[in-house]
Amino acid sequence: MQLIEYIAARLFALGMRILPLRCASALGAVIGRLAFALDRRHAERAVRQIAASFPGKSDAECRALAKAAFTHLGRCLAEFPHLPRMNASNVPRFIEMRGLDALRDLLARGHGAIFITGHIGFWELTGAALAASGIPLTVIARPIDNPRVDAFVRRVRTAGGQVVVDKLGAMRGSLRALKEGGAVGILMDQDAGKGGLFVDFLGREASTIDAPARLAMRTGAAVVAVTSYREPSTARRVLRVGAEVEMAGAEELGGDEEAAVLENTRRMSEALAEAVSEHPEQWLWVHRRWKTRPPESVPGETSQSSEGGEGDGG
């Protein structure tokens, strides 16, 4: 089965790579809309999560947003095989970079930088474009279950100069990158399970990784939200560097380091949620972001994974 998945992935990538980027993107949009129509389980999950995150929207608006999100995801999948063609000279053809000079200024401090990002816009392009622009970037990624597909995706990701480290060995690789004055990219919008910290994300408590906050507090690295999006009117891809996220010190919270970790995780989550709120049609709503519930949501039990509730399900 894994071999069949790998062959299918390679054939899809080959087909998209043969097409001009614009044509591949258009075909990907069609694929995304078909997926929305045919994959009812994930489509309904997306609708429920949108409705829970934006309670003021009607059912029709939530469905339109979910369909747009599927369309966007189809575009990203179809454009992914084109990333190895990007280099320092042609980055502007792929994406407009906004705030790159500010990013270089942060790195010039010498303590490195932590880029908090998520599955917003074309996140794979975000990292590839930064690396192609000369930003020394290490990204943390969970290996794909199919090792053949994982190796293929890793080759595409690293073609432009990114360094990819596995999630399990992320701390050592991240510390090394920051010590050398580079940047570390971390996806913060995935459910962190029982070991995560519960902070607000789009109006609901979500289990969130605390590693970025601990890493920033330990190294003094600058923290900034770096996200991408596709402009609705022109379809032009844009990479935006947000304002630096100020980190709280333990001394500000009575010397309580764990309280500082929680507060900094909250600040990072808030910065990322702002980016998602600006372009909700370009976020990965099929992901079960609120899967793990806080302990108080289930009286007498510790935090658990819930198949339903809180706008999630399936």
Image (tube, rainbow, N blue to C red):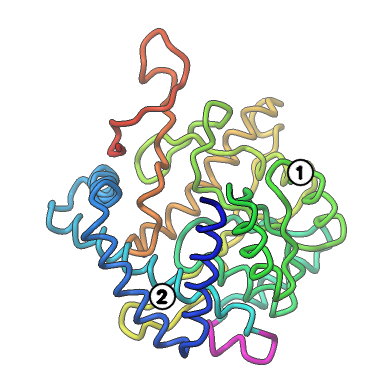
Relative to 224, say whether 194 is above or below.
Answer: above
Q: Is residue 89 magenta?
A: yes
Instruction: Kindly report the distance in space between the C-alpha atoms of the residues bearing marks 1 and 2.
Output: 32 Å
Under circle 1, the secondary element is helix
Can you give x and y, in whole percent of width and height, for residue 60 in the image? 12, 57
- Mark 1 or 2 closer to N-term? 1
Residue at image point 54% right, 90% down: 93
Rendered image: mark on residue 66: none
Nearer to the camera, 35 or 243: 35
User: Which residue is painted at 46% across and 79% down in the image?
Assistant: 237
Mark 1 or 2: the one toward you: 1
Give residue 116's position: percent from left, percent from top: 59, 55
- Magenta segment boundaries in residue numbering: 87-96
Give, as a three-letter code, the residue at label 2: Arg
Kindly identify which residue carries mark 1: 169
User: Residue 15: percent from the left, percent from the top?
Assistant: 47, 80
Q: Is residue 72 above or below residue 25?
A: above
Residue at image mark 2: 230
Indicate the position of residue 128 as horizontal and vertical percent values. 63, 72
Circle 2 — which element? strand
Quarter where residue 258 is shown: top right
The amino acid at mark 1 is Gly
On the picture, is 16 further left or further right than 97?
Answer: left
Q: Quadrant of residue 158?
A: bottom right
